Every structure is written in structure tokens, then in C-alpha cells.
Image (tube, rainbow, N blue to C red):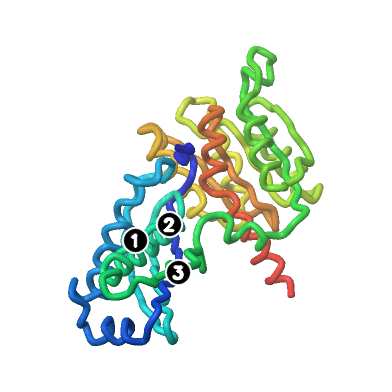
Amino acid sequence: MVDITHKSSTLRKAIAQATVKVSTPETIEAVVQKKVPKGDVFEMAKTAGLFAAKRTSDIIPDCHPLPVEYTAVRYRIEELEIFVEVEVHTIYKTGVEVEAMHAASVVALTMYDMLKPIDKGIEIRNIRLLEKKGGKSDFKDNFRQGLKAGVIVCSDTISAGKKEDKAGKAVMEKLEQHKVTIADYTIIPDEVEQIQEKVQALVNGGCDMVLISGGTGLSKRDVTPEAVRPMLDREIPGIVEAIRDYGQQRTPFAMLSRSVAGLVGDTLVITLPGSTRGAAESVDAVFPAVLHIFRIIAGARH
């Protein structure tokens, strides 16, 4: 299966449809009047569809097991066609399109099986996805384009040339995946004044965001939060809450991070862990949703 451990759980919905075409009006009448010998077609097929939605990962090899938290089976009759509609919801890391289509298929097959003794001309048609919602793809076109970022790496050892920077490069790679242009990349030691001077220079230079990797831990030289917090015009605690929650699901040490985030003027400043994995996962935790900030800022100007 595809690795989805880097994804965040969101509300996801899908609606799928299948069409069952019978050959005579008498078949439709038997279904509506519940006179089919095998039983109540709509109720039996609905039950089968509910089971199918929950067991999709047992049948489709690449489907992830996920919590199906809502399933609805609806019917609509038009002349000789019965339209089956299945809606599935979950709060998880991946969508439920296949679950909805699998359930719609099984509903249609159950109807076929129950009706074949009285109608030899039944057809199952057009199993298809009608609608899907949830996940990052819903929002990818809703963010301002052409954003510029400055990336600062705070590390005594890296700035002294004793160690190679990997975290900052990982952050830049992640940003470029979200079509954010890297306007500046700097490595500086863990010094409050130098951090503040560099952040201010990037703000003055027109960067839309500044991401700082390193110095958010608990050693005596970790001073990035102390440098950045006094500069913030507005702190945004939800960003770092999301980062820590995301990280805590992957390592028990994420709760020790002292990251801060907020606005300096109209520039978003986020401090990230200094480890390569921690920095990259922090970006995964809040991007691209955090880019909505710039829509809000642009709207406030008008």
C-alpha cells in the first residue's frame, strides 16, 4: 500500500452511484411492494452495502483499512431504472471513494441476485463516483500564488562548518512542492541578536514567510523562541499546536519543542525543530492549509 503516514486526518466524504436496470414494470412493482420471493430488496441490498463499505480494504489490495464513520444508501426509481447512491464519511488520512463505489457495486449485485428469479433481463450500469470532498487536494487552488519565503538555519555547529545542514534543505524542498519560491537561505549561529536581525531583514525585503529551523529545544543555546516571540505582532498558537500534535503522533519527544509562530507585519514567521525529520514533518503538518493566512491578509487590505 502507499505510505500515508505523513498525511493528516481530515473529514473526507464520497458519493458513488450504480444503476440497476430491470426489463419490466412488474419487477419495479414487486420491489416497491416488497413482493420479491427472496425478501425486501431495498433493505437487504442496503445491509449488504453497509457491510461492503466497512470491508473494502479486505477486498481491494491497495485500500487502507480506515474508520467508516457514516454510510447512507439511497434509492431513486425512474421508469425501469433503480439508481443506487451510497455516501461514505470518515475522518482519516485518505479518502473513501473506493469504499463508496465498492458499496454501490455490492448493493447493485445484491439487487441483481434477489431479482434474477423473476427477471432475466437485469443489467448493472454506470458504477461511478459522483462526488468527493476532503484532503489537501480540495484546497490546492485556493491559495495565493507567487509567495516568497526565507529559510534560516540556527545552529552553532552548522554555522561553524562542523556539520552539514539537512533540515533547512528539507524545508526548502517541502516549500517548493507547494510552489513557494525560496528568496533567501541563511545559516547563522544561535544568537538572539543575529536571529532578530536576519528575520527583520527578510521582513523588510518583502518575504511573505520566514521559516527558522533549529534552536527550539531545551539546551542553553536554544534561543530561537526567545528571539522571535518579542518580534511578533500577532502570535498564532494554533500553528504550533498543530505541529506538536502531528509530531507527537510520530515521536513522544515532540511535546518538548518550544516552537512559536505568528505575524511580523504581514510576514508569517514559523520556528521549526532543528532535526531534519522534525523540520520536514512540521511543514507537512501545516502546509498547505497555513497558506490561507495570505488570503486573509489580502482580504483585510480591501
User: According to the image, label 2 marks what residue?
Assistant: 96
Residue at the farthest right position? 205
Earlier in the chain: of badge 3 and badge 1, it is 3
**In this image, 29 relative to 198: left or right?**
left
**Percent position of residue 189, x then y:** 65, 25
**Camera-side mark, 2 or 1:** 1
Earlier in the chain: of badge 2 and badge 3, it is 3
User: According to the image, label 3 marks what residue?
Assistant: 17
Where residue 211 sits, quadrant-wise, is: top right
User: According to the image, label 1 marks what residue?
Assistant: 106
Q: Tell me the element at label 1.
A: helix
Badge 2 density bin: few <14, some 14–19, many ≥20, Cα 10 Å? many
Residue 40 or residue 25, whichever sits in front? 25
Residue at position x 73%, y 31% in the image:
186
Q: Amino acid at mark 1?
A: Val
Residue 251 or residue 198, whichever sits in front? 251
Between the C-alphas of marks 3 and 1, the distance is: 11 Å
**Percent position of residue 210, x then y:** 68, 44
Tell me: residue 108, above or below residue 273: below
Residue 1 numbered mark, or none: none
Residue at position x 62%, y 57% in the image:
233
Q: Amino acid at mark 3?
A: Gln
Residue at position x 32%, y 53% in the image:
67
Q: Tell me the element at label 2.
A: loop
Between the C-alphas of marks 2 and 1, the distance is: 15 Å
Residue at position x 51%, y 33% in the image:
278
Contact, CB < 8 Å: mark 3 with mark 1? no
If the image is split into quadrants, where does the N terminus sit? top left
Q: Tell me the element at label 3.
A: strand
